[in-house]
Amino acid sequence: MAGIVLLSGGLDSTVSLGLYLEDDTLDLALTFDYGQRSRVQEIKAARLIAAHYDIAHKIISLPFLEEQTTTALVNTEKDLPNISGIDLDNFEQRIKNAADVWVPNRNGLFINIAAVYAENLKPPASIITGFNSEEASSFPDNSLKFIYAINQSLKYSTMQKTTVVSPTSKLTKNDIVREGLRLNIPWHYIWSCYNDQSQLCGTCESCQHFKRALLNNSRQKLVDEIFSDVSQKEGV
Ligand SMILES: [Zn+2]
């Protein structure tokens, strides 16, 4: 089965890519530019990761989505949610933070765009996404129910009856890091940060989940390298 991966340059989509490649091939990686603060770093990370795995890479600009997204993920006049480590598992806090970085119909849109590309691939391509079980509770478009629903929809909207596959969808962040270690993903290319600085901020919700999962897998040295070694990133 062929495959198109939605590659943000973050941990989840990279591990999902790696897991899919264990049994299948990938034809194309798609990265979306919708005005997100970290667009430059995300695109750079995705480009490096796609090249690392020798997958063709395409960047798709969605200026209308930038116009329609009012939250802090795009709007720099609003503050990104910053939470302390002890609140990472607070469900109410996560729901509130999700609203602060919400992008309207993002995953539904990305999948439907990928499905257009999938129509022209032979054999028909699956669409690979990097959903995870924890974010599914605060971002419903990361859930197993969403995958099921959009696959039902794609049966009607694509000739190839393209399906969405998410190898990480039942995994926690800790599990995903563990799989990333097993797969030996290129850790120093990963960009899992909401901010637009030259290195991972280490304090946004996304960075904190990433850091905590690395520490839970006893990878303090990797945390030190990823979150502090700017020269290593810029040298690649
Ligand atoms: Zn961050």
Image: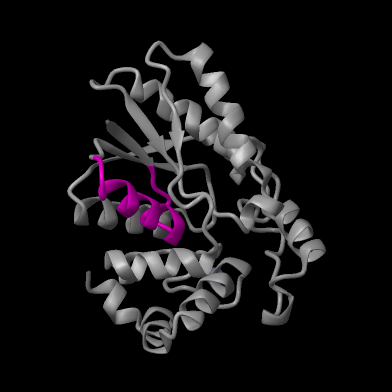
Residue 26 placement, left or right of 90 = left
Q: Residue at x 40, y 10 (%)?
A: 159
Q: Residue at x 56, y 21 (%)?
A: 152
* Residue 160: quarter of image: top left
User: Residue 27's quadrant in the figure?
Assistant: top left
Q: Nearer the viewer, residue 109 or 121?
A: 121
Outermost residue toward the left in this view? 54
Q: Position of residue 102 (x, y in %)?
A: 68, 48
Assess whether residue 18 is covered by the magenta stretch.
Answer: yes
Q: Taking 89 as reference, is 20 above or below it? A: above
Residue 201: tell me if it is visible.
no
Q: Nearer the viewer, residue 33 or 130?
A: 130
Q: Is residue 25 above or below residue 153?
A: below
Instruction: Indicate the position of residue 166 as horizontal and vertical percent values.
Output: 46, 44
Ligand 1's quadrant is bottom right
Q: Quadrant of the N terminus?
A: top left
Instruction: Tell me how many marks there are.
Output: 0
Q: Residue at x 64, y 50 (%)?
A: 136
Q: Position of residue 62 (x, y in %)?
A: 49, 34
- Residue at 54% across, 54% down: 132
Quadrant of the rendering where the C terminus is positioned? bottom left
Find the magenta span and give its range: 6-24
Residue 11 vertical placement versus 31 (above, below)? below
Q: Is residue 19 visible?
A: yes
**In the image, is 63 to the left or to the right of 104?**
left
Residue 16 drawn in magenta? yes
Query: Left or right: 138 with respect to 182?
Result: right
Up/down of 35 relative to 151, above or below: below
Which color scheme does this rendered protein use? one colour
User: For residue 161, which quarter of the picture?
Assistant: top left
Q: Observer-nearest residue: 75 or 49?
A: 49
